[in-house]
Amino acid sequence: MQDFTKSYAPKNMLNPIAIHNGSGLREISVSNDATELDPGTGLSCNKDGDNHVLTLYHGYKNSGKTYNGNMLWETNTPGMYMGIEVTSINFGGQYWNEKFWVNWSNGETSGAKKFDLTNIMPKDGRFELCQRPTNWTYFGLGGIVLWVKYHLYIDDSFNPAGATSLSVSLQKEQSYDYQFASSPAFSGSYNVYYDIAPNQLTINYPTCQANAVTGDGVTNSTVPFGEQNAKDISANTINRKFSIKLSNCAYVKELNVTLSSATVGGQDNTLLGNTLTGSEAAGGIGVMIEGEKNPNSPADWTLLKPNISSSIYSFTNSPDYENSEIGNAEQVMNFQATLKQDGNKAITPGKFKATGKFTITYP
């Protein structure tokens, strides 16, 4: 007999990832289905049946990091790591379905995972082939098929620099990815090696392709107030609801909104000021903009202060977003505009127009 190496170039071994702001070590993707690694050979028996323990080794380089108690393995991409979960093994038609993580050092170490076939394989008709007068004759029982799920993690040192695709592989300190070996090894036993090619990883960035401002009476992104009296303005009872709708969104976890304007209130700079001037312009009033409550902004209404970078309205309709999901295609944020007195300035009649620019980012 001789050692056997099977090479693999699995497609879609790694799920696409989406880039979001974050801090610390975090999981960003888990393969949907376990990758099947079938060498088509590997499992035999001998006359005495004394070679019944198989050991699973791996060749990966320890990153020195763990996540939820599981060891993470270094990749060829700085700041990116993998956790390895074996979901099933087929030993010649008999399945080991107790999931486990690769949580031991590389190479032939004492901590490697061992499997006693006497507890896995029944004494079925195939074993009768092993009852021969010489124990150096071996009879094939089938291959050893691995199903492996890959968990992808990044930390703050990961920087894709705008790349949309990366060739990702696990760093190895052995010549193989996985190895099955008889334990103990003796004459006639041999090793099965699994060698896996780098996998292409697709990188997505959050985006939305269209937007619209909607609400009662809203036209061309203009929210109308009509004619109002000074008493109601002073009482803060005049408000208008409007929405900003983003469509064709992908990989959007949350939205951050800031407000800017060339003209703000003279006394109250949290207000959008009147851009009209001259004798016909109204005085002493401005518009306050607030965002409606959502899982990211728990207050009933969150004030957006114009030209203040730290004044952010955060929005999500995917509070359980995880692992680079494609997310919701439509994002609708609700706001209200309130006509208010500008500090203690006297309210004077006239025409009024305020302009605000909403800047939306995808953290």
Image (cartoon, grey):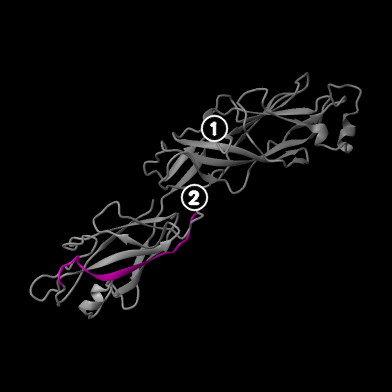
* In the foreground, 147 or 238: 238
Picture quadrant of residue 263? bottom left
**Residue 122, horizontal then vertical, whole percent:** 85, 38
Q: Are marks 1 and 2 in contact (CB under 8 Å)?
A: no
Q: Residue at x 17, y 68 (%)?
A: 274
Comes first in the chain, label 1 or label 2: 1
Write down the region rendered in magenta: 325-346
Instruction: Decide: is 91 above or below 293.
Output: above
Three-letter code, disc 2: Ser
Can residue 173 be spotted in the picture? yes
**Residue 323, horizontal then vertical, whole percent:** 51, 48
Q: CA distance from mark 1 to mark 2?
A: 20 Å
Residue identified by numbered label 2: 324
Residue identified by numbered label 1: 73
Instruction: Decide: is 192 above or below 258.
Output: above
Q: Residue at x 62, y 23 (%)?
A: 107
Can residue 248 be spotted in the picture? no
Three-letter code, disc 1: Trp
Label 1 crowd bin: few (<14), some (14–19), many (20+), radius 10 Å: many
**Residue 95, horizontal then vertical, whole percent:** 76, 41
**Residue 358, horizontal then vertical, whole percent:** 29, 61
296 displayed left or right of 213: right
The verdict on residue 221 being magenta is no
Could you tell me which secondary element the residue under label 2 belongs to?
Answer: loop
Instruction: Decide: is 44 above or below 348.
Output: above
